[in-house]
């Protein structure tokens, strides 16, 4: 019981501690690549990503048409891949994130599994970069790919960078994300190993006997359902940096928390919190499994 109370207390502190770090970073951190903090421009996005997002907004766009614009990694598991950022933007973002990681600024860690990395909202990158990316480009794309998992109802996110390097984190255990949908973009650098593996949806009783192995390709993003069990194989050599965006739809999670599968009992938090809202959820078709 004591452990549980400690965990509740730890979680209660997360919001205010994060807000304090964000304020300190805003007042005293000096970026090395300030241009990544300006409002997201289409010139930062890969032509393939722009084309897929643009197609998705057309009247009459359908899944079949969209699938011609991306790589289907697994039809059964509904995992897709496409380039997201241009190479120069990837490079600039990576340089900025590395500069921050090496600074003496306080850092919130992405989740309980990764000890290295950066939370993008603490750096002030939500407003100029992640929110526009979600609202303008990911939303139409996800609405066509995953209409049954809240793809058309995305209203918040949690974005972070995970870093794997020798002597630091090298792998990630099997888990599911606190997200309806996830975008995972490989930013670099040069590395071997570190492939993702995917099992079934976590609600499906199964073993991970024959997971699907998916290599990261620098510059490219993988799209998958948050509930799809996955993990990362050990890094071989080099450094691996990935931008992970956990995409959330309050209309889905307000009904059933995707982590505990119960009706959520909400407490106040800062920013997007965990993506729940107190309003009545809109009526939305929801996948029976995620
Ligand atoms: O290492 C990766 O690329 C996956 C990270 C991941 O699954 C997560 O942070 O939720
Ligand atoms: Fe994950």
Image: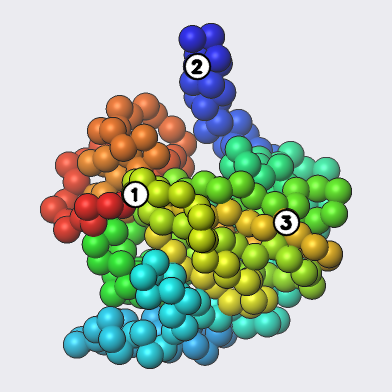
Give SS at disc 1: loop
43 relative to 240 in the view: left or right = left
Query: Which image quadrant is residue 146 in?
Result: bottom left
Q: Real-space Cα distance between discs 2 and 3?
A: 31 Å
Q: Of marks 2 and 3, which one's residue comes earlier in the chain?
A: 2
Mark nearer the viewer, 1 or 2 = 1
Q: Residue 41: where, in percent of width, then height? A: 53, 78
* Mark 2 neighbour density, 10 Å: few (under 14) some (14–19) many (20 or more): few
Q: Residue 141: where, in percent of width, then height? A: 36, 75
- Which is nearer the eye, 226 or 74? 74
Q: Which residue is mark 3?
A: 234
**Above or below 125: residue 66:** below
User: Residue at the location (39% across, 67% down)?
Assistant: 77
Extreme residue in the front direction: 209
Give SS at disc 3: loop
* Mark 1 neighbour density, 10 Å: few (under 14) some (14–19) many (20 or more): few
Q: Residue 91: where, in percent of width, then height? A: 73, 75
Q: Which residue is mark 2?
A: 4
Mark nearer the viewer, 2 or 3 = 3
């Amino acid at each position: 019981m004591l452990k549980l109370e400690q965990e509740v207390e730890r979680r209660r502190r997360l919001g205010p501690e994060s807000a304090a770090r964000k304020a300190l970073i805003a007042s005293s951190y000096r970026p090395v690549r300030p241009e990544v903090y300006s409002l997201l421009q289409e010139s930062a996005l890969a032509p393939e990503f722009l084309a897929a997002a643009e197609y998705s907004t057309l009247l009459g766009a359908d899944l079949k048409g969209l699938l011609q614009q991306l790589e289907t990694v697994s039809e059964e598991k509904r995992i897709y891949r496409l380039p997201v950022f241009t190479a120069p933007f990837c490079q600039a973002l990576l340089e900025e994130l590395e500069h921050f990681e090496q600074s003496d600024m306080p850092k919130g860690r992405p989740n309980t599994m990764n000890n290295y990395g950066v939370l993008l909202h603490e750096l002030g990158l939500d407003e100029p970069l992640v929110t526009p990316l979600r609202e303008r480009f990911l939303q139409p794309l996800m609405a066509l790919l995953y209409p049954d998992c809240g793809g058309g109802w995305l209203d918040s996110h949690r974005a972070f960078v995970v870093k794997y390097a020798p002597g630091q984190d090298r792998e990630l255990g099997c888990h599911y994300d606190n997200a309806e949908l996830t975008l995972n973009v490989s930013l670099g650098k040069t590395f071997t190993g570190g492939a993702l593996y995917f099992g079934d949806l976590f609600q499906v009783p199964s073993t991970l006997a024959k997971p699907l192995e998916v290599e990261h390709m620098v510059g490219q993003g993988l799209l998958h359902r948050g509930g799809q069990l996955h993990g990362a194989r050990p890094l071989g050599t080099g450094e691996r940096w990935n931008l992970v965006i956990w995409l959330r739809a309050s209309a889905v999670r307000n009904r059933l928390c995707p982590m505990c599968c119960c009706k959520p009992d909400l407490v106040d938090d800062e920013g997007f919190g965990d993506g729940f809202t107190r309003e009545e959820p809109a009526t939305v078709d929801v996948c029976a499994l995620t």
